[in-house]
Image (spheres, coloured by chain):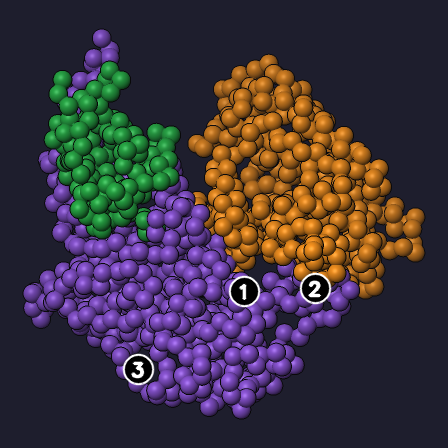
Chain colours: A orange, B purple, C green
Amino acid sequence: MPRLCEICQNSKAVLRRPKTAQRICKQCFYHVFETEVHNTIVDNQLFRRGDRVGIGASGGKDSTVLAYVMKTLNERHNYGLDLYLLSIDEGIAGYRDDSLETVKRNKEQYSLPLLIVSYEQLYGWSMDSIVEAVGRKNNCTFCGVFRRQALDRGALMLDLDHIVTGHNADDVAETILMNIFRGDLPRLGRCTEIATAGDGYIVRSKPFKYAYEKEIVMYAYFKKLDYFSTECTYSPNAYRGYAREFLKDLEAVRPSAILDIIYSGEAMQVAQDVQMPVAAQCERCGYISSNRVCKACTLLEGLERGVPKLGIARSAKASLEGVPDVAKRGGRTVERVHFDKLWENARRMRLERSENNTDVCTGSACAGVCNAQNTGSLTNM
Amino acid sequence: MCDIDAAQTPDARKPTNRTNKTQNERLRVPGKCIKCKTARPNVTIRKSLYCKPCFVRASVVKFRAALSKSRRRIADKTTPNTLEPAAPRAMVALSGGPCSSALLQLTLDYHNSMLQKGAAVQSPYLQIIVGHIDESALFDVPNDAVRSVAGDAVQFRQAHLEDVFAVGENSGALLEIVAASIAPGESSDRFRARVLESEHFSSSSSSSSPREQLHRLFDSLESATNREALLDAIKMFLLTKLAHASNCSVLLMGDSATRIASKIVSLTSRGRGFSLPLEVASECLWLDGLAVVRPMRDFVAKEIAFLNRWAGFASVVVPTFTTGAPAHASIDRLTEAFVVGLDCDFASTVPTVCRTVQKLEPRPEALAACSCLVCGLPVDPGSLTWRSRLTVSDAPSSSSAAAAIDCVPADHSSSDSSNNGNSDVAVPLLDISTRLCYACQSVLHFCKSDGLVLPAFCAERLADQTDSSASNNTRGHEDLRKQVEQFLIDSDKEDSD
Amino acid sequence: MEDLKLTLKFSSGAELMIKDEIRADAGTKTGDLELTRTLPATTDGKPTIAKDLLEFIRDNLIKDRQEDFYDKEKLRPGILVIINGSDWEVEDGPEYRLQNNDTVEFISTLHGG
């Protein structure tokens, strides 16, 4: 006799749920998975009706499932969100080019508008050309700094209110552990936050904060979602590798460990000296920065002048003085669009939308004009 | 040629190269003890070399400094306006393992040396008493060995694990969990329990010795992780009780830096983040009238091993549920292996983790929260909802029915007549979900069988809480109080041990 | 060259890793364990060092999960080695060149044994 689903007691159980070890059927799995993401969104009041939300889409499993679930929930619970796919093309042959093909298919499958911004286009350097110039040691620093800014640039091009990323519970738990191992209290405090507006312009959040990686994979598998599964060809952070392996072991000992770690991380609530970084702007590109010149601009200058260590070396106040203007390797100098300009464009788009479309108010798009009717959060849906 | 050069006695070559680099105080003579600069070293602790006598001396100094610092911090908090607070009685928690044995000997050594100096110098403690929890009900431990570790010069008090089930003759009650599972259609975890009154309990057919009950409790827990968690809770309860009974207001624990670091990671992984700051604190004043102090926090396991050896401190091997088992036998076990390994690859992981996380303060809610029936530490009031929102287990159709958190489900009582001989004492079930902390819920959640009988202190805590919560008397509280009333242990009654 | 006669001691839980029959032979089923073993003075043409001893112990004395004791040139973290009364890290650690009549002790600092 086949085992029945422990939730509906009706259908045949087809999977053992990684998070709770319950044996459940496919339909109940979809239900609990989607409901938990919905609960996450509602309980944290992530969005407001009318928000323009970009889904950071890499073509990988997390963001593909995220796009699908966001679209599903938006329709089911009538969030009233305008969804977009936003992809970054780092320029990594054999990895990103293939995964972007997946995103392009997703665009059709989910009929969501897609914007791809590339490092090449924004900075004049692809990751491949950066690796050629700096080697494989610090390339991940470049990629991380550039991606953060690229997402903000893309978001402004689309005039988004919010970006959601596919970070899952495993990622969050891993980061909590890592910050404990390193004794990094400020980061430990920050890494459990579901939404951050801290370092950029647009709110970022992780609706999958509590979703197990294994369940995301299962969801994609049962729903037959189209995703791309290859690791980045440039190897990941070694120290994170320790935390990741340990987390996998913990999960094997006790499946709830991932969720329990996140619970602990939130419950510890590190008392932070609420030190809002001075909202200074980079004097070159206008990006938010605590220094005169932002990290991205420093890294770029290093690349362009042939001193790629600039902005990486610890001792770095590493000055540029006396560094000869070395012939550029691999990249080309591009005029980077100043953030003020991006803002201005975004505001204009907003205005145009509200003029063209007076009966459908898109919430924040009104920029405060119709605050009264339309700022209701999604709490009660 | 170069090879030969390099292989030649490096000691002889180095001094000439390095003498310029000296910093007056921290002068290092290569190949010599960092303290006396003359003796051949016998041990290296984090890149510093020590000879035997210097190492022992340095350890003693370090311990005394830590103990004095703790004492001053506690005095600042408890008696801020007293210049010379009276020296309290201190209980040293002794398992017999290397850390607690070292703790005991160092504490005694400090105490005695102060006594010898006469009245001019006050010993930090009025008296040192050893508190030991005898675990022979569960493990094969040679108890005499622990006694001899303590020596004859010090008062030795001990409690037994099975004591937590010793109710019967006088008064007292046990708490039985009747159902602890996610029932189909339930939208959140429920723990339904009933109070078993002592007379009823001892006269019923299912009566058994405390030892048997202890075994049954541990047998029905699903994993070594849970068994270890429950054992910790029981031991901590017994130790605090023993301390109170001995009029000690200080409880010294032997947690080393290595142990604290693994504990931090393992408590985090077991969902104990809410109470973690209290559980690893250098000084914890959370327990009523008792300061828990961890003066070994600056010693890594290696230091303790060498200190015990060279100072001649005896210790025994204390077995646990996972002794000799592979690393993935439990979360505690896995974590210890991982943290110790990480410390090998990234030196100073242990001290870093210790130092930073010990800075964490418990959240304000934690200090006001009620204590968990099982572990006695604060219950995060939001945890029940948190979990139920993120581990949904109701069927698609019934999702609209939001469960009221405080309801006392009385309609399930029909099914619990199984091991209850006397129908007169049949009581409706209590919902104790809000009185269990997040982590202890997990411990009890997967118990193998329903009808799990918890130690007597769980019922006592329940009684205390319902007694003192008159201020926010909801209907649930009132019901609870009425039921528990008759089993309340007179809180004024002396804990005689 | 002569063989090396070594005294090996296991305590503080390290003895629990040793095969039961070896402990029974030594007459100490519980508690500290002391053994005498003889190793060749050279291993693979080179003087025998502590690393060779670890491999010998792993292959001959350790109960099960031998790789837990010594694997990939790494002694299990949490086990201390004491050679003639001193921390082996003061000497050359695994590279220490063993001498006849050396006493090598293994102490576990791990709680879980």
Name the quadrant containing residue B496. Answer: bottom left
Q: Residue at x 18, y 32 (%)?
A: C37
Residue A83, given in percent of the width and then of the height, sits at 79, 46
Above or below B225: residue C36: above
* Along the viewing direction, whichever of C49 and A105 lies nearer the viewer: C49
Q: Residue at x 60, y 35 (%)?
A: A145
- One can see residue A169 in this view: yes
Separation of residues labelled 3 and 1 (CA atoms): 31 Å
Check disc 1: other Cα within 10 Å, few if <14, some if 14-19, many if 20+.
many
- One can see residue B33 in this view: no
Numbered circles on residues, count: 3
Name the quadrant containing residue B86. Answer: bottom left
Q: Are marks 3 and 1 on the same chain?
A: yes
- Viewport quadrant of the C terminus of chain B: bottom left
- Tell me the residue that label 2 is attached to: B394
Residue C83, given in percent of the width and then of the height, sits at 18, 35
Q: Is residue B28 left or right of residue A103?
A: left
Residue B218, given in percent of the width and then of the height, sits at 42, 65
Disc 3 chain ID: B
User: Mark 1 is on which residue type?
Assistant: His
Mark 2 or 3, nearer chain start? 2
Check disc 3: other Cα within 10 Å, few if <14, some if 14-19, many if 20+.
few
On residue C105, which mark appears? none
Mark 1 or 2, nearer chain start? 2
Above or below B19: residue B413: below
On residue B445, which mark appears? 1
* Along the viewing direction, whichever of B344 and C59 lies nearer the viewer: C59
Q: Are marks 2 and 3 on the same chain?
A: yes
Mark 3 or 1, nearer chain start? 1
- Tell me the residue that label 3 is attached to: B495
User: Mark 2 is on which residue type?
Assistant: Asp
